[in-house]
Image: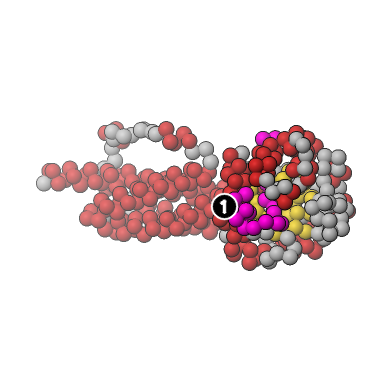
Amino acid sequence: MVVEADANLRVARLIDANLDRAREGLRVIEDWCRFGLDRDDLVVPLKDWRQRLGQQHHDRYRRARSTATDVAAGLGHPAQASRSTAQAIVKANASRVQEALRVLEEFGRNLDPDLASISAEIRYGLYDLEVCILEACGRQHRQERLEAAKLCLITDPDRDNNLERLLQGVEAALMAGVSLVQYRRKQGNDQQRLLEARALKALCCRFEALFIINDRIDLALLVDADGVHLGQDDLPLSEARQLLGPERLLGRSTHRLEHLLAAQQEGADYLGVGPVFATATKPDRSPAGLSWVTEASRHAVVPWFAIGGIDAETIPSVRAAGAQRVAVVSAIMGSNDPEEASRTLLQTLT
């Protein structure tokens, strides 16, 4: 009987520790969803689970607690110091909660069946909710990087169809500080597009830059791009969002005010505003001029990039008209020194 009582005490200590562990981990995730993501729909189940576990944290478990005799008390691990992002912290705490709940299931079956049942229910619920939270974290991180971006480089691989030169030009721009790259190819086959998109995605990952695909949602999903940019004649944004998912960015080109207002109402994350000046990449489109930039600055509530024939010489006038961000093609990809051209453009935008 003494042996059995001692065993039950040890199990009670184990249950107490894992209840603490699970509730603490849930609180970490809950607070990030509340204060970091502003998502009450994610907070509600987390709070409910934490409270339900609290109701199962009976006094007999608390009385069994003995921190002084815990051989692993205060034991840390180097991995804890590497959690430098909110997403990493959420992942670590979700795993912590799931592991603690599994322990509660295993050891609670005989001693506390209700606790074991609730722990299993919460564990399976957290598996699904974690995916939603991490998607929200990924979207927030992309939004923050989008807000910080001042210069968008749009590629022009149709110029010479040379992958090596394309990558060299984009890498030079990234080295100079460009943090947003949009892959656009009008000519060529899908195998070529996929090859280039994968190479550019890997390059952008090295420099922690956003990578956007022009037009092609399927290609964006294949290479795990950060988003898709659509023109006025492309899919409606609501349908595009269904295919793309909630975590990636969705941009829209706008050429007049009704385009801009409609894109914002439909949920665009950012806008292209132009063409401001005549451009060789869109010879069939008449420039809208600086007045369109000024009009956009008065009505845009999401990040937007002035585009069309912009270079280092015209940026001051574009900024004076109200733009804080610009997108360029030839000013970088047509330069003999893409790194220096990018650096000059960024300095002019500062």
Residues 324 and 280: in front is 280
Q: Inspect the magenta stretch and tell me whether residue 8 lies in it.
A: no
Q: Nearer the viewer, residue 247 or 104?
A: 247
* Position in image of residue 210 (x %, y %): 63, 46
User: Residue 246: in sight, yes or no?
Assistant: no
Where disc 1 sits, the SS reads: helix
Q: Which residues are magenta?
A: 175-196
Left or right of 43? Residue 122 is left
At which x and y percent is residue 60? Answer: 27, 48
Disc 1 residue type?
A: Val
Up-down relation of residue 284 to residue 324 (above or below): below
For the point 58% across and 39% down, which residue is it? Answer: 206
Res 240 quadrant in image: bottom right
Residue at 57% across, 47% down: 36
Magenta stretch encompasses residue 190: yes
Give the residue displayed 68% in from the left and 66% down from the top. Answer: 236
What color scheme is it?
secondary structure
| Quarter occupied by the C terminus | top right
Question: Can residue 83 be seen here?
Answer: yes
Residue position marked by numbered label 1 in the rendering? 223
Position of residue 172 relative to residue 113, above or below, is: above
Q: Residues within 10 Å of mark 1 (few under 14, many from 20)?
A: some
- Residue 31, how many percent across, how many down? 51, 48
Residue in view at x 43 percent, y 48 percent: 94
Is residue 42 or residue 264 the one in the foreground? 264
